Amino acid sequence: MGILTQFFGWWDGATYGTSFTLWRRRARLVGKDEQGNRYFEERTASGPDGNRRRWVVYHGVPEASRVTPDWHGWLHHTFADPPTLAPLKRRSWEKDHLPNMTGTPLAYHPPGSLAATNGKAPAEAYEAWTPENA
């Protein structure tokens, strides 16, 4: 990573400012998830509620929906222990975590959507409105 990219490049990992903050607050690496995101926690409590502050440093694009539910709960102090120590129990009906796919080719398109039909709506999906039908 180039010096300028790391200095100004918030879109691709930790900047020097983030790295400096983690160093200054003596944050320790708690764990990594399957997407490569790294999670940190302060060594001493300094938050207004007496909690230790927690951070995520994204691997690649910083998109909050890429944080899995177990790490999200840890970041927001819902769980005391990180998923590396106490992983969430998965239920048989739970699906795997997916990030927000809006704006990507994998986004959901309902039936009849112009995006789902390559820009052409099926003729039977459209009925013109007339005042008599109202």
Image (cartoon, rainbow, N blue to C red):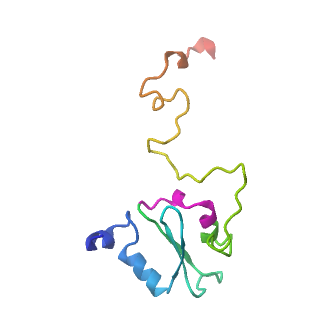
Magenta stretch: give its range: 61-72
Above/below status of 50 relative to 92: below
Residue 118 as seen in the image, left or right of residue 77: left
- Rendered position, 1 above or below 105: below
Q: Position of residue 44 (x, y in %)?
A: 58, 88
| Quadrant into which the N terminus falls | bottom left
Residue 40 in the magenta stretch? The answer is no
Q: How many marks?
A: 0
Magenta-span inclusion, residue 63: yes
Q: Residue at (60%, 66%) from the top-left corner? A: 71
What is the x, y in percent for residue 45?
61, 86
Q: Position of residue 122 (x, y in %)?
A: 49, 19
Q: Quadrant of residue 46?
A: bottom right
Q: Residue at x 46, y 81 (%)?
A: 22
Give the answer, above or below, for where 102 lies relative to 73.
Answer: above
* Viewer-nearest residue: 61 or 46: 61
Q: Is residue 67 left or right of residue 17?
A: right
> What is the quadrant of the C terminus in the image?
top right
Name the residue: 72% across, 54% down. 91
Provide residue 89's location: percent of width, then percent of height.
71, 62
120 vs 89, left or right, is left
In the depicted structure, whether residue 32 falls above or below residue 67: below
Q: Residue at x 44, y 44 (%)?
A: 104
